Every structure is written in structure tokens, then in C-alpha cells.
Image (cartoon, grey):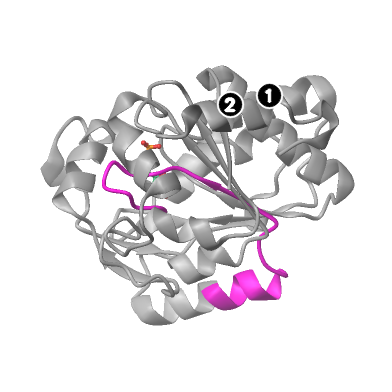
Amino acid sequence: MEVVIAPAQELAVLAAEAIEALLRRRPQAVLGLATGSSPSQVYDELARRHAEGGLSFARARGFMLDEYVGLAADHPERYRNVIAADIAERVDWPADQVQGPDGLASDLSAACAAYERAIADAGGVDLQLLGIGTDGHIAFNEPGSSLASRTRIKTLTTQTRVDNARFFDGDVEQVPTHCLTQGLGTIMEARHLVLLATGRHKAEAVHQLVEGPVSALWPATVMQFHPHATVLVDEAAASRLQLASYYRQTYDSKPAWQGL
Ligand code: F6R
């Protein structure tokens, strides 16, 4: 696992560079998309590179990590709408090439199975962007999730609903209680995992992710088994890392051409 400690804007540039390098090499690449605060500067940087540098998403495919269950189709916090506003509509990405699990399906289990098939039919995810919850979730795999889980319905923890209330006028009652989420087993099949975390409130989750014992109690720890995982953190999110100086030394001595 590679850990990079840098200011948030630099982290966003690094992640955007990795995505741009992938799309230039493989225009039909499959990108895994996270929602929330963590990737927003990455999406800003990608939109800038599209506008100023001709970076194209026209042939790419996108798969979202998760979706709330039951939010109305036009609800601004429905993740499909968030991803459209944050990235897809800011670049040349055809709407039908970006998909998420269907949180409005009448048969949610069938929708999850269909989503797994769609990812497999696309050839799997090349690069998966991730954030991390303060409780250690990735996507919405809350503590206790099977490390081998696939796309399924999950109950959100009270902690996650409180954390996400900021997107719902600060009212936790408006935050849905359930979601559909890619499983940890699904996420682990992506060829490159790029996780972003900023802020002191993420420090314990980042410490567990990188240095803790692998455990369903901190679901993100499953990433320790991934052969190509990159963890991008600012100083505050890195503040509990025991080996921070070693990660800095390793990254500082890496050849610039190597990328993430
Ligand atoms: C969202 C998702 C979640 C978030 C996590 C952190 O698609 O998968 O795991 O990445 O809850 O959220 P932020 O970035 O808003 O702190």
C-alpha cells in the first residue's frame, strides 16, 4: 500500500493525473466513482483538464460505488444526480455510460445482481476512487460487513447518517436509512484503488486502514490485501499514522515519472 501525505489540493492533482494517464492510455477505461466531499476536488481538477487540456471521457465507462435507497429520482442528493453534477455533466461523458445501483428498483436484490453483472460485462473497474467514513467504511460497507461481500442492501449506521446530515440541511431524519453498495469483494476486484481522506476526523479510520489489524470492524482494512492500493491523505488525516515519516521518505525518493 502506498501512502502519500500532502496538502489536499496536491492530492487531488495526483489522483486526477492518475485518471488522466489511464484515459490517455486507454480511452475506454472503466472508472469507479465515489461521491461525497473527498473526491470533489479531484472532479474539479478533471473538469479543468477537460476544459483546458482536452481530456475526454467520451469512451469511458463509470460505475458508482453506492446509492441511497428510496430517494426520489429528482432528489439532489441521489448519488446518480450528485455524480452527474459533480463530474459527468461537466465533461463529455455520455449519461448512459455512467451507472449506479438502482435504489428505486422494486426488486433491490435483483438490482444488485444486475449491477454486479454490468461491472463484470464492462471488464471490471480499472481505477476505483474511494473515500472513507469516520467509522472505517468504504463505499457503504459499514463495520461488520463481510470482507468478501458483493453488491447488496445495507443499513447505514447512525454515525454515517449523522456524518451525512450535512448534505440534508443538517437534518439526520432526512438521511435515508438504507443504501445499495458495492461489496468489499466487488471493490477489491478493481485493478487500482485510490482512496482520499482529509481532516482530523478521518485520522483514526486512516490509521486503522493502513496500520490496523484486518478486521470487519474497520472494513477499509481489507485494502491491505490489495496489490495496488494508494492512500492519499493530508497532514490532519495522517496525524495518527505511526509510520508517517517512513511513508514520506518512501514517497519522496520515488522517481517522478512513476505516477501512482
Ligand atoms: C460515497 C462513499 C462513502 C464516502 C465516505 C466519506 O460514495 O462511498 O464511502 O466516500 O462516507 O464521505 P466524505 O468524502 O463525504 O467524507
Q: Is residue 64 left or right of residue 143?
A: right
Residue 76 seen by the camera: no
Q: Disc 2 marks which amino acid?
A: Arg
User: Where is mark 2, residue-wise?
Assistant: 248
User: Where is mark 1, residue-wise?
Assistant: 252
Q: Is 135 one of the magenta-colored residues?
A: yes
Q: Where's residue 171, x and y in %?
A: 14, 36
| 240 in relation to 1, above or below | above
Q: Is residue 113 left or right of residue 92?
A: left
Q: Evaluate if marks 2 and 1 touch, with contact meaning CB atoms under 8 Å apart.
A: yes
Residue at 75%, 31% (x, y): give it: 254
Could you tell me which secondary element the residue under label 2 belongs to? helix
Q: Which residues are magenta?
A: 116-138
Residue at 29%, 59% (x, y): give it: 142
From the Cβ of disc 1, is ligand 1 less than 8 Å away? no
Q: Where's residue 210, x and y in %?
A: 45, 46
Q: Nearer the viewer, residue 94 or 186?
A: 186
Residue at 33%, 63% (x, y): give it: 215
| 6 in relation to 181, above or below | above
